[in-house]
């Protein structure tokens, strides 16, 4: 990747972060090398940290993002204590009709939330993390939830379901030969090249929502 291309990617990311009103990118620093983006500096919330990473991935030419941003709440912001954060997340999980939170435990230490216990599907694990990360006062989320699927599905059937769904996807149809899907004990590994970040997210989401999946390892690159 030429220096000029690298500078274009860097400037596009800066413009993207500046545009996004959720982030406040005044203290965010961007570096790019061989398609790998490093985000450093501070943002006012954990939700902003997550948004910054997603924004960087939206830029053409980005293969991977290393998110080293730190969360520093504005001085005038009233932060809830750890117990309040825990209680707020627990309430959100109970109120969410899609996540069975009966076996989820939440613990917060210095703003860092740990999720432990089990859920019935991989997508519920990710949704629980999303609920936690968008809760005020959170500085990081450690997701240790286990997936205990209620219905056993053969690895070969999981792989078949994912590949068939790829063929029906407008973003992925025609690129199936560039994608590799392997499944071992319900753990899906995606590898290969997809044409864009939206296609990468689509490939991941299809695997995420497939019955029998307990984890998804995303090794896909864009190009």
Image (tube, rainbow, N blue to C red):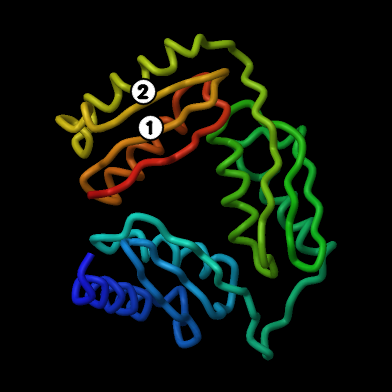
Residue carrying label 1 = 206
Q: Residue at x 61, y 43 (%)?
A: 96
Residue carrying label 2 = 162
Q: Residue at x 25, y 77 (%)?
A: 7
105 and 220: which one is in front? 220
Q: Which mark is residue 195?
A: none
Could you tell me if the residues under marks 2 and 1 are in contact, i.e. CB atoms within 8 Å?
A: yes
Q: Quadrant of residue 19?
A: bottom left
Image coordinates for residue 34, horizontal then vertical, percent: 32, 63
Q: Quadrant of residue 192?
A: top left
Label 2, label 1: how far apart the Cα atoms are: 7 Å
- Secondary structure beneath dot 1 equals helix
Image coordinates for residue 144, horizontal then vertical, percent: 70, 42
* Left or right position of 102 against 204: right
Q: Residue at x 40, y 37 (%)?
A: 205
Image coordinates for residue 92, horizontal then vertical, percent: 67, 50
- Secondary structure beneath dot 2 equals helix
Q: Residue at x 80, y 64 (%)?
A: 84
* Left or right position of 84 against 33: right
206 in relation to 219, above or below: above
For the view shown, which residue lies furthest in the bottom direction? 76
């Amino acid at each position: 990747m030429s220096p000029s291309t690298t500078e274009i990617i860097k400037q596009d990311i800066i413009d993207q972060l500046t545009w996004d009103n959720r982030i406040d990118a005044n203290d965010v620093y961007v570096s790019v090398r061989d398609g790998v983006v490093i985000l450093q500096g501070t943002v006012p919330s954990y939700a902003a940290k997550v948004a910054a990473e997603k924004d960087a991935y939206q830029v053409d030419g980005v293969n991977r993002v290393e998110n080293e941003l730190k969360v520093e709440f504005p001085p005038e912001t009233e932060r809830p204590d750890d117990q309040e954060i825990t209680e707020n997340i627990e309430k959100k999980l109970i109120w969410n009709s899609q996540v069975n939170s009966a076996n989820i435990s939440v613990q917060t230490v210095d703003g860092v939330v740990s999720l432990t216990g089990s859920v019935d599907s991989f997508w519920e694990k990710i949704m629980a993390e999303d609920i936690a990360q968008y809760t005020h006062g959170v500085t990081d989320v450690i997701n240790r939830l286990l997936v205990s699927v209620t219905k056993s599905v053969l690895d070969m059937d999981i792989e078949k379901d994912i590949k068939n769904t790829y063929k029906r996807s407008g973003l992925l149809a025609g690129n199936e030969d560039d994608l590799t899907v392997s499944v071992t004990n319900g753990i899906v590994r995606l590898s290969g090249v997809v044409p864009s970040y939206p296609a990468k997210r689509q490939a991941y989401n299809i695997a995420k929502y497939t019955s029998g999946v307990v984890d998804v390892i995303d090794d896909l690159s864009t190009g």
